[in-house]
Structures are given as C-alpha cells and as structure tokens.
Image (spheres, rainbow, N blue to C red):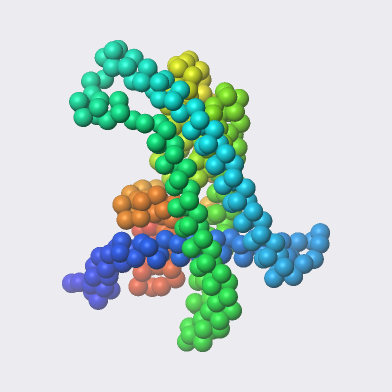
Amino acid sequence: MITNNQINFYFLTPLFILALYFGKFLLVPLLFSLFIFIILKSSSKKLSSNNFFKINYELSFLLVSIFFILLIYFIGILLESNLKKVINNSQLYQNNFLIVFESIKNSKIASLPVSIDNFISNLNFTSIFSKILNSLTGIAGNVSLIFLYLIFIVLEEKLFKSKILKFPSNKSSMTIINKINNEIFSYFQLKTLTSLLTGILTFMTLSFFNNDLSIFFGLLSFLLNFIPFLGSLFSVILPFVFSLIQFLDLVQASFLILILIFIQILVGNFIEPKLMGKSLNLSPIVMLITLSLMAKLWGISGMFLSIPLLVVLLIIFSNFKSTHKIAIFLSEKGEIH
C-alpha cells in the first residue's frame, strides 16, 4: 500500500525538478550568493576569534569581503591580459592546428564525417579566443548580480534569525541551519585548498613548458576541480591539445599530459582524501546522477553547485523522520552522522 509520504515524494519530485529548470535565472545567482555568504561569514568568525589579534566580527567580515572582491578583480585582470596575448598569436595557432589536423587525416588514425571535417577546417581561433574574452563581460554581469544578492542577504541575516526563532520548532530549525553552515564551509574550505593547489601546480607546469595559456589553464584547473569526475579529465586534455597546437611537438605534449595526470592523481587520490576525510558522506553514484541532472538543468553552473546542494539535501533529509530513508540512500555507506 502506498503511504502519504510516498505520494508526496512522487508528486513533489517532478515539481521540484521543473522549479529548478524554470527558476534557473533566479536560483543560480541566489545559491552562489548564499554559499559565498556562508564562506565569508565562517571565515570572518575564524578571523575574529583568532588568538593573535582581536577584532570584532563586523570588521573581520568587511576585511574578508574586501579581500574576496580584490582577489576576483586581480584574477580577472590576469586572465584578460593572458587572453589578449593569445589573441595576438591566434593566426599561428590557426596554422599549427591545421597542420595537426591534416597529419591526423593523412595518418588514417580516424575517418571523420564530411560535416565534422568541414567544421574543424573552418574553425577560427581569433574568433574563439575573442568570444572567450568577450564572455568575461557577461560573467562580470552575473558576478555583479551575485554581489547584489549578497548585499541583501547580509542586510537580512539578523531579521532572518529572528524569524526562525519565532518558529514553533525553532531549536530544530536553527540546529539544521548551523549544521548546513558548518558542512558547506568545511566543504568549500577544503575543496578550495585542494583546487588552489591543483591550479598552482598546473600553472607552474605549463609555465615551465612555456605554454601561452598557462594562467588561463591554471585558473580553469582550479575551477574544474570543483566539478567531480569530469573536471579532472578536462583539466588534463585541454592543456595537452593546446600544447600540441602551440609547439607541434608530440613528445613534449606527451610529457606534459603525464605530469598533469600525476598532479590530478596526487591531489585527487592522496591529498584531498587526507584533508577532507569523512567530511563528505555522499554516494558516488548519487553524486554522478546529480551532476548529470544539474548539468542538464543549469549547465556549467549546475555542475559547480551539484555537490553543495547534495550536502544541504542530505542534512535536511536526515533531520526529519519522513525523509530519513532518502538521506540513507544519498549517503555513502548508509550511515547518517
């Protein structure tokens, strides 16, 4: 016999997915704002409670926020400078790419359909790099919207707390919210550290090989490390392909890809598990399904947000009897902490 909880689950799940799809324009910047707020707030609390120098929470929040804004601005300038340099050499990459493409065709390694052959032959590298550079303007617009949401979240924080405390089960609600804060901050803190290490090592490796897009791929590797499974793959393949196009040297490109694979294995299989330990209690298959679903619904943004959203859902579901079984299903070993 089907219970009321099962009916609610089967009825609400499609509605939830539809809400995610049609609410993308509102939910994506809002969720990024919420997660950034959690990071800023938790970092500010740690800074204000340090033993070396005493500052109040409001000042520490302001300092952390300014540092965060300046960091994004500085990265944007570096990235723009790197891409402009590459655009100036785009004709060289175009010619080298056609040489590599013709070599592959002549070697008969793979037989490509005529449509793909024509598409690759007509690729314009100047246009591609210019579009990437122009897209930074669009990204800057989204970042502005995220910061606008963030300002209102900061202003609303104290009022939100007072509203929660008026709930009949305010103690339970505040416990869940505090747990979400702690788990999300822990995830982003450790993931940022390992992603930063991956990005720096990738940048240093590419700089050693004189890759013209070392800054771009270093930053890309940092960002892609937040995407499970696929992120590591693209962090290795894209620099390899560009290195082959830039230098027309298969031996050098092969050495490069081996070093990049070693970096991914070192950070992803040894350093990250040591640091993160049991901080994530998520089933790998559920993570993969969620990643695929969020990629379909929200694109790249969904891939970045998929794991934090899973963490939030696991915490919420584990705190209610009616959804406790779902939390067990989402967890790695069926154990809820």
Of 146 and 183, the residue lying toward us? 146
- Which residue occupies 54% across, 71% down? 153
Q: Is residue 15 visible?
A: yes
Of 319 and 174, the residue lying toward us? 174
Residue 66 placement, left or right of 218: right
x then y, percent, for residue 66: 66, 59
Residue 268 placement, left or right of 7: right
x then y, percent, for residue 22: 30, 64
Q: Can you say which quadrant of the picture contains the N terminus?
A: bottom left
Residue 236 against residue 59 in the figure, above or below: above
Residue 149 placement, left or right of 328: right
x then y, percent, for residue 196: 59, 43
Residue 222 against residue 23 in the figure, above or below: above
- Which residue occupies 64% across, 54% down? 70
- Which residue occupies 25% across, 76% down? 4
Of 239 and 160, the residue lying toward us? 239
- Which residue occupies 52% across, 37% down? 83
